[in-house]
Amino acid sequence: MPTMTIDDDCGRHNRFLRALRRQRVDTTPVWVMRQAGRYLPEYRATRQRAGSFMNLCRSPELACEVTLQPVERFELDAAILFSDILTIPDAMGLGLGFVEGEGPRFARPLRTLDAITRLAVPDPEMELRYVPDAVRLIRRELRGRVPLIGFAGSPWTLACYMVEGGPSEGFARIKKLMWDHPEALHHLLGVLTQAVRAYLEAQVRAGAQAIMLFDSWGGVLAPGDYREFSLANLCRLAQGIDRGPEQVPLIVFSRGANGHLEALSQSGADALGIDWTQDLGEARARTDGRVALQGNLDPAAMYASPASLRQQVDLVLRSYGDGPGHVFNLGHGITPDVDPEQMRVLVDAVHQLGRPRDTLA
Amino acid sequence: MPTMTIDDDCGRHNRFLRALRRQRVDTTPVWVMRQAGRYLPEYRATRQRAGSFMNLCRSPELACEVTLQPVERFELDAAILFSDILTIPDAMGLGLGFVEGEGPRFARPLRTLDAITRLAVPDPEMELRYVPDAVRLIRRELRGRVPLIGFAGSPWTLACYMVEGGPSEGFARIKKLMWDHPEALHHLLGVLTQAVRAYLEAQVRAGAQAIMLFDSWGGVLAPGDYREFSLANLCRLAQGIDRGPEQVPLIVFSRGANGHLEALSQSGADALGIDWTQDLGEARARTDGRVALQGNLDPAAMYASPASLRQQVDLVLRSYGDGPGHVFNLGHGITPDVDPEQMRVLVDAVHQLGRPRDTLA
């Protein structure tokens, strides 16, 4: 049997998936949350042609185009499906729209217990067919250059948007529901868990090579509420999703839930997203090699000078330390007014400063 | 020597200070961040008479009036000076104003390194005289009913507002300064540390019976940056402030910095404010009896039914457990549209469900 060279099995086309599986890589892989987004002029041009954000999401051709833009411009190690976590509630009939500068807004938020009981699980190959269609098209156009990540919002996070109607500061509506009518919220979360499961399974069947759950609002809960209303359904999904013959890896990002890393590392996820307020080395110690870790540069570092940015990249790589299982990312999405050239500085710094990582820590 | 009854030394006038010193109390004391605020109709009336928020802060008579309002309406165990953390930068010449619905805004934010080097420490008995004057007046009008808390913003938090110019989402400006010109930020933080120290010492001399440092933005920093740019100056203040012959206790609230509770408990503070995403019992174990803890009900619980609110109060009391050193509070300020009657429910629940706490844990 001939000796494989590092390039054969660990190059750009494979380094991200190998790192998620805690296998040997030639250098640390990197991708960036919201890498297909407003900081790129080519994205803004496609977005303008689309007319609206939802038109962009609903067109497999345009979604494919913007998904590929950052991968073609930078040496990123993964592509992520261009879509939105709120496609599921939209397919449930809540009427998703985007107000410029304010974010998502539902025309028909959940305002009564009755509205909750009437919800049904959408069929992803019917009401959400544009999403698996986009996955199929993107896989074809990527031609194996880098793996494609599919994603969904967590049940708790979707419920927050559906009950609040849009972004919220205090989450007063959903928390009132949680405390005054916990059985109604559990019903809603149960329906959403089924919907997210079917949706991610459809993405896997369509060709997603890794999947990610965004629990953007887990961190607004007190610990007991977090375990009952957010973590429980993350575990159900991590253990219940049929991930296909390849057993595609699952990344869970529960933002602001750094007090729960031990429990999250036992959820069944292969990797955890980590925000920048958490020391990576400490997260690694607390999760004890059960999962890979993805993160966690402060997104504001993209505004620093190139020299400072490189230094901050180095600090993140050092905080993770040697051994396998690190996927480099920002600790939150890249912001719209970052200079795109900083992305090149970031990606080059990770690849140059990231050492080959062996399977032995 | 006659036996003291519980009422003699542990009643409303004293329970808060005893809890901060981890001494025996008859029941758990409670006060609420922003207890003098917009949710109270009598506050809104005074605020309207004042004409502007800063007029209200700058008038000792009006500041005294609103400080006393919640103490007269509810059985709260402490009063807190009505003021704003941004009085210091205002006295430094940055021109503080408040935009309705948007929060504070400086007319002359720090936008050059030169502007930073020109800053001088204000004399609290001159440029900020209205603050110690308000403290003196409030102490007189309180007539010993409950203790009075003075406060200031932390150097890091003040620097955030001064450099960003107002509230910020990503803190890109101050973080760029931090990474590209760390020596300039350290200079700014050094000036602010002197200013905060002089300001809090003036409040203590004027009669403040406890003092609190609000590090509202500590939690936006990565761990290494937090230690260097936020924690270091909290420690300098905790150890450096002359707290007078009575050695008035110091509470430090570093919001979102739950990963740093061990270090904070060794800062020299007597008590730590805790937000609602942190389990109090775990915080107590990690700080190992070195400090009292203040918190930490989810502020959204004020929107739940009275029965749910009582239940949530009970959960917080239970998470702290038996033994001394608990001051009940929300994990963040009370929000403007809460029904004031819920404050009565909260205070009564804490006093009824909070058990007498002995000095032995």
Image (cartoon, coloured by chain):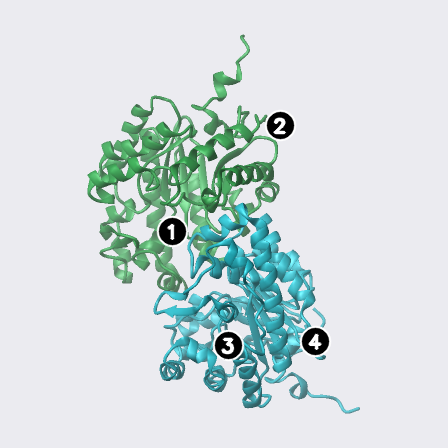
Chain colours: A cyan, B green
Q: Which residue is mark 1?
A: B157
Answer whether labels 1 and 2 touch (C-beta < 8 Å).
no
The label nearer to you, 3 versus 2, is 2
Q: Does the rendering let one see residue A320?
A: yes
Q: Which residue is mark 4?
A: A247
x and y percent of residue A79 in the render? 54, 80
Q: Amino acid at mark 4?
A: Gln
Q: Amino acid at mark 3?
A: Ala
Q: Amino acid at mark 2?
A: Leu
Q: Quadrant of the C terminus of chain B?
A: top right
The label nearer to you, 1 versus 3, is 1
> Do the residues indicated by labels 1 and 4 lie within the same chain of the protein?
no
Q: Chain of mark 1?
A: B
Q: Which mark is residue B360?
A: 2
In the picture shown, does residue B52 fall above or below B181?
A: above
Q: Which residue is mark 3?
A: A349
